Image: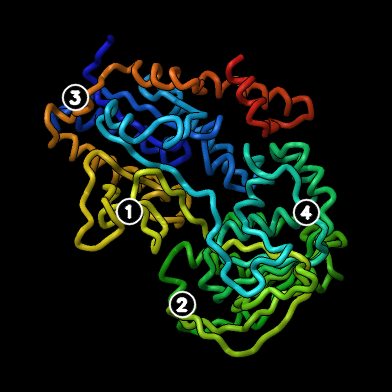
Amino acid sequence: MSETNELRIAVIGAGPAGVYSSDIFLRQLGKLGEELGLGTKARIDLFEKLPVPFGLVRYGVAPDHPSIKFIASALEKTLDNPDIHLYCDVEFGKDVTLDELLERYDAVLFATGAVEDKPLGLPGADLDGVYGAAKFVEWYDGYPTGAREWPLDAEEVAVIGGGNVAMDVARELMRNADDLKERTDIPDNVYEGIKANKAKTLHLFIRRGVAQAKFSVQELREMEKLPGVQLIINEDDFDLDDDTIEEAGKDKLTRQMVEELFTIREMAEDMEDDGDTDFEGDPADRKYCIHFNSAPVEVLGEDGKVKAIRVEKTTTSADGKMTRTGEFEEYPVQAVYHAIGYKPATAPGIAYDERRAHLANANGDGRITTEASGEGAQVRERLYATGWAKRGPVGLIGSTKSDALLIVTNMLEDLSKAAEGGRVAADRDPESIDRLLASRGVKPIDFAGWKKVDAFERAEGAKEGREHKKVIDPEQMRALAHA
């Protein structure tokens, strides 16, 4: 037995939330450990149910986001740390239980993210041709257990949502396959699918006004540069009153977004004046229509399939309050995609807050509780949540860093109060977890294994003059990693 005196932390989920938290924990321990009586050494074991790390960055964001490769590169540098041990292809609750982790680790941090859509909840939501964004994102991002083919035979398509995921979905539906392949790591099945896409007209419906949308400026700039696509807007949507303009000006990000939307309005007018062209002045063969103050109320069908969408006009006050007008319009569409939010994953043995859609934790401070809320909710020692698991599906990847700092601060505070300087796990042998997994026939993929998958993806991409080409088959990933 090789017992060690370092702190032992288990992190569930190797996406941005889990990796940032691991990094920040080690940094903060290095700074504050001595004064807290914890020492400065810790071993962090990072468990991921997929065969590869990076979660949302690899599988939740559109492949044509230029910033993503930089984020992935930063996360990889963090994982290349001798104090962080990666255990991919190990599923919490199935391959290892909570009790088994608590026996071996001083604290367990959940950073489990989200993979499911919030239900649409409109009449007609169960028609053939209505899709949740999450499943479509899984397809175009090559999620290991996702669909390998996607029906893209609708000529007229609706996307519902006023956030970045809606923008991603709409952009991929309007994408030119060759242009996308040239600049991204999409696998062959996605290239072939998008090449065969029949969509000619897309309607993006946003329930509130121009000043209340939740788009990032980066998303809007990517929307502006779609080859062969004409942007179409309703000028009335941009008739903002003084109060709304003043309110939008109070927040820097909102102000920048509104300014960019006004740039898009001018672009759309130029495209129309130039004879229905794209951003470069070339003839457009696809139309992307952006509708603000438009709340879908029903998906209409025929023979069980989508045939149209019914939308109610709304008005939005300066404080963001939406009012329905009773004015309706129907748009012929054969497919509807809804991107109205994700539902973060549950975790076996951990209470879930259904109303706020995250793991139950005390006042949002990341300390896991016995139930969602109410007088009976007690803090469960040594259990924590961060990222979407803690706060629900809101905020960008950057928000995850500030979350991690808060949770790590709370963890260190609790560990410093615990007996023996936080070293409370009974089994302190670092190889104990390896023996347990081996006894179950579980073969984790470590950082070196991931690097083999990554090297193969780079080599495959280089054959086509691309930086990277994704492997999507989990069995192929395992074979590469264990070779």
Q: CA distance from mark 1 to mark 3?
A: 30 Å
The kind of residue tagged 1 is Ala
Give residue 59's quadrant in the image: top right
Residue named by callout 3: 39
The disc labelled 2 sits on which kind of residue? Answer: Gly
Q: Earlier in the sequence, mark 3 or mark 2?
A: 3
Q: Residues within 10 Å of mark 2 (few under 14, many from 20)?
A: some
Looking at the image, residue 31 lies above or below residue 58: above
Dot 2 or dot 1, earlier in sequence: 2
Mark 1, other Cα within 10 Å: few <14 / some 14–19 / many ≥20:
many
The secondary structure type at the circle numbered 4 is loop
Q: Going by the image, does 17 lie left or right of 266?
A: left
Q: Nearer the viewer, residue 99 or 202?
A: 99
* Kind of residue sitting beneath label 4: Pro
Query: Can residue 62 be seen?
Result: yes
Residue linked to disc 1: 360
Disc 3 or 4, which lies upstream in sequence?
3
Task: Give the residue number, with chain letter if any, for mark 4.
Answer: 151
In the depicted structure, whether residue 152 falls above or below residue 447: below
Find residue 181 and report its horizontal and vertical position in percent: 76, 41
Q: Earlier in the sequence, mark 1 or mark 3?
A: 3
Q: Position of residue 215 (x, y in %)?
A: 55, 62
Q: CA distance from mark 3 to mark 4?
A: 56 Å
Q: Mark 2 sits on what residue?
A: 320
Identify which residue is drawn at 72% across, 70% down.
Answer: 289
Q: Nearer the viewer, mark 3 or mark 4?
A: 4
- In contact (CB < 8 Å): disc 4 and disc 2: no
Q: Residue at x 56, y 22 (%)?
A: 451
Q: Amino acid at mark 3?
A: Gly
